[in-house]
Image (cartoon, rainbow, N blue to C red):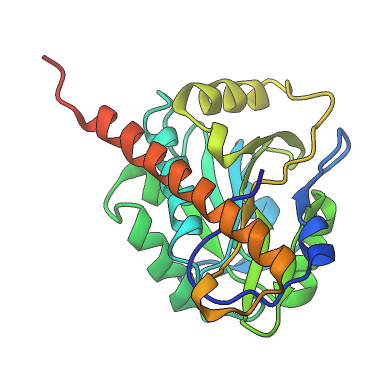
Amino acid sequence: MGLTALPVCAGETLSDLAKVSARPNSESRLPLATTFTDQFGNSKELGQALDKKPAVLLFVDYACRNMCSAMVLLASNALANSGLVPGDEFGLLAIGLAPDVRVVAAREFKDSVIDPGSPLSAATQFFTGDAAAIKKVTDAVGYHYSRDGENAQFAHAATLFVISGEGKVMRAIPAANVDSDSLHEALVGAQHGAGDSSFNPINLLCYGYAASHGGANRPVRLILETASAAMLIFMAGIIFRLARRARPIS
């Protein structure tokens, strides 16, 4: 199933979209010596960012304020309600897919979806990096995405990676399946070295598209229009779940 983020026209082909997926395996590990820049402009190796604690890792297009924002919002709310202590028991990491993006873009995206004064915000790091660093990490975890050069947008899998404190990929969760219980279980498991022994490919798609611009050929447009409807259902589900959590307990 694919979900798309609105809005821009689509310059991708069926072949491009077919390659987009998250396919980690039981040996997948982050390259801990790879350096990125955090939202404050500090250079950090991924090993420093993990600080020997489990983390949830997301790949994000900082220019996408629809599906990507919804994915991060869902993850952050699930983590906030997981019963685990941010910073002590887990961290949240995001890596921008676009190379050489200004640090301010990462900081503004982070602050738009996570309360800057919250404990979760203090345990969250949003990174930018060069093309070589991004490729090294995405290759290492089996994350396959496509850049639409015509529109400067990314087609990528809406996936949360649960990473151990040593950098091993313990679990990959489609964004549509994320809740506080699943993240609690995955992060506690990661603390004790327990994860999935096999991984199913994830093809849940986040991609900028607007049918009114007519930028896609007919087969691609049909897929993306169908996926747009799925995206609306997915986002409605997010709103419903967040509203239920915010309801006062009588």
Residue 4: x percent and y percent?
56, 57
Q: Nearer the viewer, residue 17 or 82?
A: 17
- 28 relative position to 66: left or right: right
Q: Residue at x 63, y 74 (%)?
A: 10
Q: Is residue 228 above or below residue 159?
A: below
Residue 195: x percent and y percent?
74, 24
Quadrant location of the C terminus in the rendered image: top left
Q: Is residue 192 visible?
A: yes
Quadrant of the image occupied by residue 197: top right
Considering every residue shown, the one lying at the far bottom of the view is 150
Q: Residue at x 26, y 34 (%)?
A: 243
Q: Is residue 41 visible?
A: no
Quadrant location of the N terminus in the rendered image: top right
Q: Is residue 218 above or below residue 30?
A: below
- 229 relative position to 165: left or right: left
Residue 33: x percent and y percent?
77, 59
Considering every residue shown, the one lying at the far front of the view is 218
Q: Nearer the viewer, residue 43 or 99?
A: 99
Residue 217: x percent and y percent?
71, 74
Considering every residue shown, the one lying at the far left of the view is 250
Q: Residue at x 69, y 77 (%)?
A: 11
Q: Is residue 72 above or below residue 7?
A: above
Considering every residue shown, the one lying at the far top of the view is 250
Q: Residue at x 73, y 39 (%)?
A: 166
